[in-house]
């Protein structure tokens, strides 16, 4: 089976968050089920620098008024199609924002062009190759199925929602500029409170909708978590599936991780303290025995980092240390830095992100804090488990499914892997941090938590099998429908 995956980011070529980790690791796992994945990605300059040898497969004379070419490459075990459109993708900054952190003003056109190219490929524009199925990811590629249906292309489409909060909402007057007819501006396609929503269009036209955890699939059917799309999702509930994300066990492996000064596994956890010492030096924190609580995340309201700024003193008053590593909302960044300024040598805040430091934080910290107000799946807590770094998480979305709370029963049964808290507010977080600090003081119980976490295996194997089953069922259904139509004719 040949699958075209369409995405705006892909690890290790370009990454802003968990979307890249998923689109980069899922194809490798799907290969074990007989699925050959080719990924379509914008040819950002940073991507072109990393892929090495390339070949031009075809040219587009007019992709929403721009010239573009389709480039083939193989890199890091991934089969790639790169949409090279200099007018849209050759610029400073990241995939979505400019060098000053502002959204690119033409994101509406940039990712409509990506989706249009994907639809053309699905419809057979590429000589000698056509996929059996298309898998789109989030709003940036959700228009693919809208374009496909307008072209009369009936290939099956799977749309994965990685975060419903980001919907690709733009003004109605962009409709003609993205090459779509007026009739798609309707409640059963793109219309969304007087604007157009790329994600809504994808939700209405994809055959199957997946989210990145079963709990999140249930949560988004409610007005609290549905972000204005709960009505649409309830109408399409029979097409909705929840599949927990996995992680790449080769990339995230403390025994072989090249970014760790000292490698270790569950039988040699004492070596982790050497990484801890390097980590504290890296962030200018005191070298003492107090626990290190870290957060590797976007510094946003969704991630609950404003609550962590308020609750940080719970750790610091009790002899712990805090490292915050990420970037996001300026006010939250300021609040965290203000707290850190009151505790020199005890708390460090670094605004930015790089992969080596993220690995070192997991390899050297004692606990990872994720107080998200909502979390479709979350990958950081899975990396933390793998590295013997105990997660402190809110009870929501994928966090509630992947972490077993260290309550008395779970501790007695030796199945606990971290600390959950609810309600999701500052006081709830404070209580969870207090529980973690108390448990850390009991060396034996803390070691049990670490070991139990390191035994869990959130690989892609089982999740990839579920995706493959969805793919095969959709293709089988299309084939059977075609036979019925031919017989009827």
Image: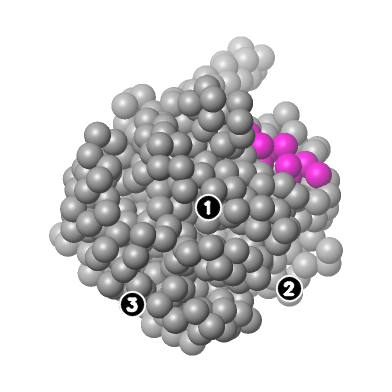
Residue 202 lies in the magenta stretch:
no
Mark carried by residue 423: none
Residue 287 percent location from the top left of the image: 31, 68
Above-or-below relation of 75 to 253: below
Q: Secondary structure at mark 2?
A: loop
Q: Is residue 32 visible?
A: yes
> For the N terminus, which image quadrant?
top left
Q: Which image quadrant is residue 331 in? A: bottom right
Q: Earlier in the sequence, mark 1 or mark 2?
A: 2
Lateral position of residue 285 relative to residue 473, left or right: left
Residue 216 lies in the magenta stretch:
yes
Mark 2 burial class by Cα count in 10 Å: few <14, some 14-19, many 20+? few
Above-or-below relation of 331 to 367: below
Q: Which residue is label 3 attached to?
A: 284
CB contact under 8 Å: marks 1 and 2: no
Q: Which residue is label 2 attached to?
A: 171
Lateral position of residue 302 relative to residue 111, left or right: right
What separation in Å lies between label 1 and label 3 (alpha carbons)? 22 Å
Q: Secondary structure at mark 1?
A: helix
Lateral position of residue 237 relative to residue 340, left or right: right
Residue 364 percent location from the top left of the image: 32, 57
Q: Which residue is label 1 attached to?
A: 437
Task: Name the residue at 83% across, 49% down.
Answer: 223
């Amino acid at each position: 089976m040949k699958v075209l995956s369409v995405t705006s980011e892909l690890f290790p070529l370009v990454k802003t968050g968990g979307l890249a980790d998923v689109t980069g690791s899922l194809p490798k796992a799907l290969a074990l089920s007989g699925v050959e994945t080719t990924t379509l990605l914008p040819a950002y300059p940073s991507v072109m620098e990393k892929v090495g040898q390339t070949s031009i497969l075809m040219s587009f004379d007019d992709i929403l008024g721009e010239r573009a070419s389709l480039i083939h490459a193989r890199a890091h075990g991934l089969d790639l199609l790169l949409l090279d459109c200099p007018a849209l993708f050759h610029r400073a900054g990241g995939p979505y924002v400019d060098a000053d952190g502002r959204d690119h003003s033409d994101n509406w056109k940039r990712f409509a062009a990506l989706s249009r190219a994907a639809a053309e490929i699905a419809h057979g524009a590429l000589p000698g190759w056509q996929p059996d199925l298309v898998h789109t990811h989030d709003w940036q590629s959700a228009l693919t199925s809208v374009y496909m249906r307008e072209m009369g292309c009936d290939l099956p489409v799977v749309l994965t929602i990685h975060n419903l909060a980001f919907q690709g909402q733009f003004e109605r007057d962009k409709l003609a500029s993205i090459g779509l007819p007026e009739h798609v501006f309707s409640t059963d396609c793109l219309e969304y409170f007087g604007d157009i929503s790329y994600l809504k269009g994808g939700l209405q036209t994809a055959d199957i909708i997946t989210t990145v955890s079963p709990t999140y699939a249930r949560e988004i059917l409610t007005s609290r978590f549905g972000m204005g799309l709960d009505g649409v999702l309830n109408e399409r509930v029979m097409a909705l599936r929840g599949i927990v994300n996995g992680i790449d066990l080769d990339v995230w492996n403390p025994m072989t991780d090249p970014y760790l000064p000292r490698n270790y596994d569950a039988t040699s956890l004492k070596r982790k303290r050497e990484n801890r010492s390097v980590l504290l030096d890296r962030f200018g924190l005191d070298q003492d025995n107090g626990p290190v609580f870290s957060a590797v995340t976007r510094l946003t309201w969704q991630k609950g980092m404003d609550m962590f700024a308020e609750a940080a003193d719970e750790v610091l008053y009790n002899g712990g240390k805090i490292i915050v590593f990420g970037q996001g909302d300026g006010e939250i960044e300021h609040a965290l830095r203000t707290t850190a300024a009151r505790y020199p040598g005890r708390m460090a805040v670094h605004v930015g992100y790089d992969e080596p430091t993220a690995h070192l934080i997991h390899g050297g910290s004692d606990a990872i804090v994720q107080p998200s107000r909502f979390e479709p799946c979350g990958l950081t807590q899975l990396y933390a488990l793998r590295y013997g770094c105990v997660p402190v998480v809110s009870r929501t979305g994928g966090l509630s499914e992947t972490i077993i709370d260290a309550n008395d029963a779970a501790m007695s049964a030796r199945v606990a892997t971290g600390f959950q808290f609810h309600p999701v507010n500052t006081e709830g977080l404070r209580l969870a941090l207090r529980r973690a600090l108390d448990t850390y003081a009991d060396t034996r119980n803390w070691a049990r938590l670490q070991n139990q976490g390191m035994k869990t295996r959130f690989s892609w194997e089982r999740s990839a099998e579920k995706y493959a089953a969805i793919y095969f069922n959709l293709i089988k259904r299309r084939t059977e429908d075609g036979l019925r139509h031919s017989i009827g004719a």
